[in-house]
Image (tube, rainbow, N blue to C red):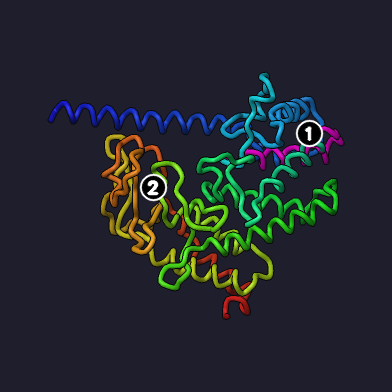
């Protein structure tokens, strides 16, 4: 028993260390991300530093038009073979680089930035399925990344970007591309509506992945089971509430999803760390939590380790996954107030 306790404790410490290392890596990557440069003036983009960073970004573009994820594409230049580069839409990749290049071109007039931007933009349009969704990367291959990927807001991020290009200050993008972007967003909205999971005749929320052909909820990694996603569904819902002049179908989807979020909120518990290990404890004063995944049909929170076996308690999965994944969050915390504002803005649609 003591030996098993030592092993369990060591596993927990290793998992916690892994989370810390990953957090440090993400912090380092964020230091060279679009958010650090989006508010810079034109003069900065024309400076030596601004031009050097643009060169770095250009060097990381894959032959297909995208950029890799979890890579500091803005802080250092790529020195390998272009054939080694694999672009993706995951974790903010590609969209952030395109925003940077668009801003750099408007400030400097460097045609290479515009050409790379249009190549990446066309890559996004090409990657959309006829059914309206996007895979995690393109070409998608045969594994789970081929599914329509709401996971980590990949598809929603693409749709926000396309709407941004079509409606804001990307004047160097021709009218045909802008029109194509709006069409892609409309097809994406239709895909979202088709993917919303219906249980006992009622619309609920969304899975993190859906089938690219028939819209069914689909699994991804072994610990990402078919489910209703409290994390990804919040981002989808907020995107729908951002639409101008929403249709009756969109309004119905919003109202149903908000009701689902209210019905599955978890009260009286708090996520904490006990000796470096994540745990759920009772706390009557804690603000509501939402589970990352809910079982379709029962709305019970579900969890899984790398063995892919469904569990109903986070404590039942191994320490590495328990501490290395966002099983709980406050994703739905402000949805009720946001929905109230949406209803005030669109009273006719919300009353249908």
In the image, farthest residue toward the left: 1
Residue 332 position, x and y percent, is 46, 59
Q: Which mark is residue 45?
A: 1
Q: 175 above or below 100?
A: below
Residue 102: within the magenta? yes
| Disc 2 and disc 1 in contact, CB within 8 angstroms | no
Q: Circle 2 is placed at which residue position?
A: 327
Residue 97 x, y percent position in the rendering: 69, 37
Which is more N-terminal, label 1 or label 2? 1
- Examine the rendering and report whether any part of residue 129 can be seen: yes
SS class, disc 1: helix
Q: Tell me if residue 184 is in the magenta stretch.
A: no
- Is residue 72 positioned above or below 229 on the image? above
Query: Which corner quadrant holds the C terminus?
Result: bottom right
Q: Which residue is depicted at the point 47% across and 51% down?
A: 218
Where's residue 240, x and y in %? Answer: 60, 63
Residue at coordinates 64% horizontally, 35% vertically from top-left? 87
Q: Secondary structure at mark 2?
A: loop
> Start and end of the magenta stretch?
91-114
Give the residue at x 67% y 23%: 78
**Residue drawn at (29%, 44%) of the image:** 279
Crowding near pointer 1: few (<14 within 10 Å), some, many (20+)?
Answer: many
């Amino acid at each position: 028993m003591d030996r098993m306790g030592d092993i369990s404790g060591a596993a927990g410490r290793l998992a916690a260390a892994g989370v810390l290392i990953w957090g440090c890596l993400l912090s380092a990557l964020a230091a060279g991300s679009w958010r650090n440069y989006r508010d810079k003036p034109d003069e900065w983009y024309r400076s030596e530093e601004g031009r050097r960073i643009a060169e770095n970004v250009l060097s990381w573009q894959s032959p297909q038009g995208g950029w890799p994820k979890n890579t500091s594409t803005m802080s250092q230049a790529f020195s390998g073979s272009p054939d080694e580069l694999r672009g993706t839409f995951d974790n903010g990749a590609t969209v952030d680089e395109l925003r940077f290049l668009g801003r750099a071109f408007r400030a400097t007039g460097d045609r290479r930035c515009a050409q790379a931007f249009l190549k990446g933009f066309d890559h996004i349009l090409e990657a959309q399925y006829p059914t309206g969704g996007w895979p995690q990367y393109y070409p998608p291959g045969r594994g789970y990344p081929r599914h329509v990927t709401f996971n980590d807001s990949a598809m929603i991020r693409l749709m926000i970007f396309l709407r941004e290009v079509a409606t804001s200050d990307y004047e160097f993008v021709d009218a045909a591309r802008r029109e194509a972007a709006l069409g892609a967003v409309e097809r994406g909205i239709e895909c979202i509506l088709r993917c919303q999971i219906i249980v006992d005749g009622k619309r609920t929320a969304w899975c993190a992945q859906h089938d690219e052909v028939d819209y069914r909820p689909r699994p991804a990694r072994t610990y990402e089971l078919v489910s209703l996603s409290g994390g990804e569904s919040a981002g989808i819902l907020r995107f729908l509430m951002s639409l101008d002049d929403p249709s009756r179908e969109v309004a119905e989807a919003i109202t149903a999803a908000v009701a689902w979020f209210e019905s599955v909120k978890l009260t009286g518990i708090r996520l904490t760390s006990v000796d470096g290990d994540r745990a759920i404890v009772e706390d009557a004063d804690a603000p509501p939590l939402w589970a990352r995944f809910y079982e379709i049909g029962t709305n019970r929170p579900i969890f899984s380790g790398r063995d892919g076996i469904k569990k109903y308690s986070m404590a039942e999965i191994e320490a590495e996954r328990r501490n290395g994944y966002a099983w709980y969050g406050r994703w739905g915390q402000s949805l009720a107030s946001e929905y109230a504002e949406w209803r005030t803005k669109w009273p006719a649609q919300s009353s249908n």
